[in-house]
Image (cartoon, coloured by chain):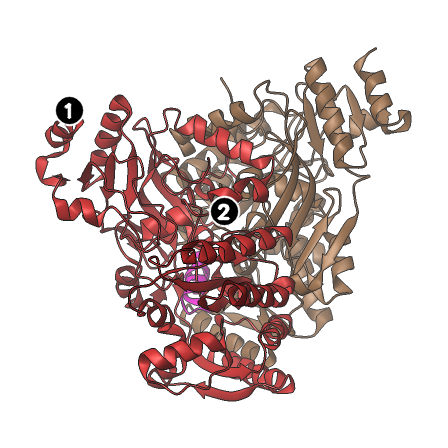
Amino acid sequence: MELFEELQQVLTPERVTKNETVLAQHSRDESYHTPHLPDVVVFPENAEEVSEVIKLANTYQTPVVPFGLGSSLEGNMIPYEQGIMIDFSLMNKVLEVKAEDFLVTVQPGVTRTQLDKELKKHGLFFSVDPGADATLGGMAATNASGTTSVKYGIMRDNVRDLEVVLADGTIIHTGNLAAKSSSGYHLNGIFVGSEGTLGCFTELTLKVYGIPEHTAAGRAAFNTVHDAVDAVIGILQAGIPVARVELVDEHSMKQINLYSETDYKEVPTLFLEFHGNEAGLQQDVDFTREIVNDYHCQELSFETDTAARNRLWEARHNAAYAYIHGNPGKKQMVTDVCLPISEMAGAIKDAREAIEASGLVGGIVGHVGDGNYHILLMINVNDPTDIEKANEVNERIVDYALIRGGTCTGEHGVGVGKQKYQEREHGAALNVMRKIKTALDPKDLLNPGKVIDLD
Amino acid sequence: MFISLLKEQIGSDKVSQSESELYRHSHDESPHQAIEPKVVCFPECSKDIEKILNIAYTHNIPVTAFGIGSGLEGQAIPIQKGISLNFERMNNVVDFSPEDMTITVQPGITRLQLNKLVNRHGLMFPIDPGADATIGGMVATNASGTTAVRYGSIRNQLLDLEVVLADGTVIHTGTHAKKSSSGYHLTGLFAGSEGTLGIISEITIQLHGIPEHTLMARCTFETLEACAEASQTILLSGIPVMRMELVDATSIDQVNTYGGYDYPIKHTLFFEFAGMQAAVKEELKLAKELLHDLGCQDWEVASDPKEQKEVWKSRHELSYAYTHIQGTLDTGADVCVPISRVPEMIVYARKLIEESGLKGGILGHIGDGNFHTIVIFDPKIEGEREKAFYTNEALAIRAIEVGGTCTGEHGVGLGKMQFQEAEHGAAVEIMKKTKQMLDPTGVLNPGKMFR
C-alpha cells in the first residue's frame, strides 16, 4: 500500500486529497516567499488522527507540515520539502470556556475572531491581536503578538497548556491549568514559537480577560518620530497602563488618508488605547495629555464612543491595505525587527533612510510600546531587483537591531525568511536549539528546513 | 586533586573548605537533610564559572548552585557533595537602562538590593517571594509570590539569561528586545531549571513603573470557603489587584500569640490595590461593596505607609510566627490550582491538617490559585514527620487531579520529584531528554527534579 491509501484508511478518503486546487491553496502564505506544493493534504479531526498521520510519516520518512490559515509572513509553513500538509480547519471547535478561571480550551483551527465571538457571550476577550484573523494554532506556532501586547503580553504569555503530538506520535501536555508553576522544565515556552518543527498542536488552553469596563482611544500627532517615541517612554515609565500604543510614520499617514478618506495630520502619529474603570481612564487620559504635551504634541484627540473608536483603529489596521491598494500589482514585504525602546527612534530614522535609498515605496508602522516595528515594502515579486532591494533594506535594519540588543523577528517568526540571521542573533545558543530539534525530531520530519538550520 | 586545580585556575581566595562555609552550604530553609559539599567556590565573573565547570566536567564532580540558601525544596543542598557555587561576589549591576525599564544584573544580587537601586528611578522589580532571595536563585526556581496575581512569576519578567553550560560554553538565551519570535525560547527553559541545565551568570529583567498610588485593606469571613469565594468575586469583577492574600484563623491566632497582637481570630483576606490614584480609589470602592455584599467583617483600609504596614502585619509575620515554636520544624505544600478549584482545595487542606493531628495553618496567594500549608512537627516525636509530609503529598496529588501543579513557586528540588510523573505524564520523557542533552555526564545539581 502507498502512503496516500494508508492515510485514507487512517482518516477517511474524503479527508485526504491530492486535488490540485487544494494543493495550491496549501503552497503559500501571505509573504513574498516562493510557493511550493505539498504531496498531499489531510484534514484530521482529533489528536489521535494527527498522531496516526505522524506515525505514517515516520514509516514513509515523509515530512509533515501543519497549516493554519496561511496568514503567516515568513513562509513558516510552505512545504519546501513536500510531504504531508496537515490542515487543521476541521479541528476548529471552542471546547470549553472556563469563565471562572479566565481560561478557554480550543482546537488549533479556531480563528481569533471566532474565539472572540464565543468569549463575548461570557464577558471575556482574548487579548492577542496580530491584525490578521489567524488560527490560534498558527498564532501559538509563531508566537504571534500585535497591538495589545504592551499590556496583555504576547502569545507565549497567554498559553497555559498545549496538547502536542510529537515526532513519534506520542501525545503530551506541556502545561496545566494553574496560573503559574515551578514544576519540571517549561515546555510551554519551547513549543510556543517552534513553528511546527517540534510537534503539532492539537489543543490549546489560553488565558482570557474580562472585557474592560471602559475603553478610550486617542490619536496624538507629533513633529518627529523621536518626540513620539519619547512620549511613549514617558507614558510607560509613569506606569500608565496603556493597552495599545502604535506609531505610524508620516508617509503611512498620507497613505491612510488616501485610503480611509480621513483628514488626519500627515505627521508621525501615535494611536493609543486605554482600558479600565471610568475614573481611572479619565486620569490615564489626563496624565497622557500632560506627557505628550511635554514632547510638543501638535494635536491630541480622544474618542470614547464605540463607533468613533472603531473608526480610529480601523484606519490604523488598514495601513497595510492602504499600501497594497495604492500600489496595484505589487506584494508586500514586511520586516519585523524588535529592539530596546530607547533605540526605537534611531532605528526608525535609519529605516526611513534605508527605504529612501532603496527607491522602493514603503511605510513604517510600529508596536512602539514593545519596540517592534514593521516596514511595509511594496515590491514586484517577479522583479529580481525589487526582491534584492527589499532584502538589502531588511539586512540593514536587522543589522541595526542586532547590534543594539534586538531581535530579527518580534512576532512573525523565523520561517525561511529569518533563518540567515539565526547564527548572528543566537550565537552559541543556536547549538542548544539544534540539539533540542534533534532530540525531539531525530528524523527531521517536522516542518524540515524551518527555524533551525541543521547543517 | 580537583580542589588544587580549582585554586590554581580561579585563585585560592575564591575556594574554601572552611568548616563554617561547608556547613553554610549544606542546607536551605527546608527540613530536607543537610549535606556538606566538598568545597565552596566563590566565582567573581562568568570566566570563573566557565573554569569551574570545565574542571567539574573533566573530573566528573557535581556542581550545585547556591544563592542565599532561602530555597524551600532542597535545591541548593549538594546531595552528591562536590562543588557548591556561591554567587555572593557576583552581585553587581552590569547594565541599567531606565528608558527601556530594563536592568542586567549578576545572579548574586538580592531582590531588596535590586529594588533599592531601581526605586530611585521610579521603577520597581515587582516579584516578591517574601524572602530576600538572590535574583539568580529566584530565576532558578521560577519564584513568584504575593504579586503574581498581577505580574506572574519571574519567568514572565526575563528578557535574557547568560548561562554557562555543562561543557563550559557561554550562551545568551534571549536579547534585550521586549519580545521575540526568533528561534526556540530558551529563556523560559532555563528559568525554573534549578541549576540542572546550566549555571546562570547574568540576568536581564523587565522593570515596571512604581504605581502612583497604593491602598491596602483587610477583612474577615466566617469560613474558608467564604474567603475563597470572595476572592473569586473580586477577580471576576475585573479589579486588577496588586496582591490578594488569605490567612486562616489558626495562623492569625499564631501571629497573635507570637507578636502579642489581638487581631480578630478569623479567616482573613488582605488586599493591595495599586495604580493611578483615581483608578485605585474606584477599585477600592467597588471591592468594599462586593465584599460587604458577601458578608465580610472587620473591614479596614490603610492609605499611608505606616497604617499599611500595620494592616498587613499579621500576613508578613506569619512564617516567623510558626518557626518561632521551639524545637519544631515546619513543612508546607505549595500547590497551585485553577481559581475555580481554590475553595474546595482549601477545605481539603484544612481537613488534611485536622486529620494529621498536628498544628498547621493555611495561607495563600489566593489571587493566582497558589496556596501554602504550614505544618509544624517535632522531629523527635515518632511519626510526626511522616504525618506532616503526608498532608503535603495528599494535597499535591489532589492539585494535580484538578488540573493544577504540585509546586506553584518553590520548585521541585528534592521534595516534589515524586510528583513529576503524575503531573507531566509523557512530557517527563521530553524533560529528561532535555537534561540528558544539555548535561550528558550529569554534573549539574545531580539528583534533583527528576529521578
Residue A215 in the image: state x and y as whole percent.
63, 71
* Letter of the red chain: B
Q: Is residue A237 left or right of residue B95?
A: right
Q: Position of residue A166 (x, y in %)?
A: 64, 30
Type of the residue with mark 1: Met
Dots 2 and 1 on the same chain: no
- Stretch in magenta: A220-239
Report helix, strand or loop for mark 1: loop
Magenta run includes residue B214: no
Kindly indicate the quadrant of the structure image that contains residue A380.
Answer: top right
Q: Is residue A361 shown to the viewer in this render? A: no
The residue that mark 1 highlights is B1
Q: CA distance from mark 2 to mark 1?
A: 37 Å
Q: What amino acid is labelled 2 in the image?
A: Ser
Q: Chain of mark 2?
A: A
* B50 over A182 or under it: above or below: above
Which chain is depicted brown? A
Q: Nearer the viewer, mark 2 or mark 1?
A: 1
Work out whether residue B219 or residue B74 is closer to the camera in this orientation and state it: B74
Residue closer to the observer: B212 or A123: A123
Q: Is any atom of residue A284 visible in this view? A: yes
**Number of callouts:** 2
- In this figure, which residue is indicated by the disc labeled 2? A183
